[in-house]
Image (cartoon, rainbow, N blue to C red):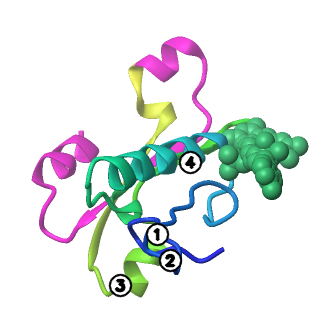
């Protein structure tokens, strides 16, 4: 089913949320969309699906987690990036927990992340 960013179907008085209309087919995504529908349909809201920041995690070992634009999505939108990598083997808490495999990679709009630069250099 097709919906616009306010989750209205082609009949503006009929809304949809969840698996039937969204690319993210997950329980919490359906829940977040249903909250938008309730606000827009019942309380004259103008909430947008595109305003959601949807995190995801894949339960491999180590896990893969992600939030925000991916490197590829940023490239496709023409957003120049500064990228920072911190290996878990350099993080005190990870060393204490014996969980030193893997890394964190943070992308920020080019020139916008002075504190991250300092953090990644330490
Ligand atoms: C095997 C499996 C495992 C999953 N595991 C996960 C997971 O680990 N984590 C996660 O986040 N998501 C998981 N999902 C996805 C998650 O279940 C869905 O994204 C979520 O249930 C979508 O919610 P929904 O309300 O859009 O749809 P649904 O939960 O499918 O609800 C739709 C409801 O509409 C009813 N219905 C259908 N037709 C009609 C009709 N004509 N009249 C009245 N009622 C009707 C149905 O009976 C159903 O109750 C899994 C899905 C499956 C199938």
Q: To which residue does mark 1 refer?
A: 8
In depth, the one of 97 and 1 nearer the eye is 1
**Residue 100 percent across, percent down from the top left:** 57, 29
Badge number at residue 26: none
Residue beneath label 2, please? Answer: 11
Residue at image coords 33%, 59%: 51
Density class for disc 1 (Cα within 10 Å; few <14, some 14-19, many ≥20) is: some
Alpha carbon distance from label 2 to label 3: 31 Å
Residue 25 visible to the viewer: yes
Q: Residue at x 40, y 82 (%)?
A: 75
Marks 2/4 in contact by CB < 8 Å: the verdict is: no
Q: Is residue 60 visible?
A: no
**3D distance between C-alphas at marks 2 and 4:** 22 Å
The residue sitting at 50% across, 47% down in the picture is 34
Q: Nearer the viewer, residue 19 or 58?
A: 19
* First reached walking from the N terminus: tag 3 or tag 4: 4
What is the span of residues highlighted in magenta in the rendered image?
A: 93-122
Identify the residue position indicated by label 3 in the image.
77
């Amino acid at each position: 089913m097709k919906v616009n960013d306010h989750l209205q179907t082609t009949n503006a008085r009929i809304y949809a949320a969840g698996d039937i209309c969204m690319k993210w087919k997950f329980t919490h995504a359906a829940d977040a969309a249903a909250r938008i529908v309730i606000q827009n349909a019942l309380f004259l809201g103008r909430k947008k699906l595109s305003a959601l920041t949807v995190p995801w995690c894949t339960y491999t070992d180590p896990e893969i987690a992600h939030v925000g634009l991916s490197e590829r999505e940023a490239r496709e939108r023409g957003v120049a990036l500064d990228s920072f990598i911190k290996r878990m083997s350099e993080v005190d808490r990870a060393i204490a927990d014996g969980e030193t495999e893997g890394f964190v990679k943070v992308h920020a709009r080019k020139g916008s992340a002075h504190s991250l630069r300092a953090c990644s250099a330490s």
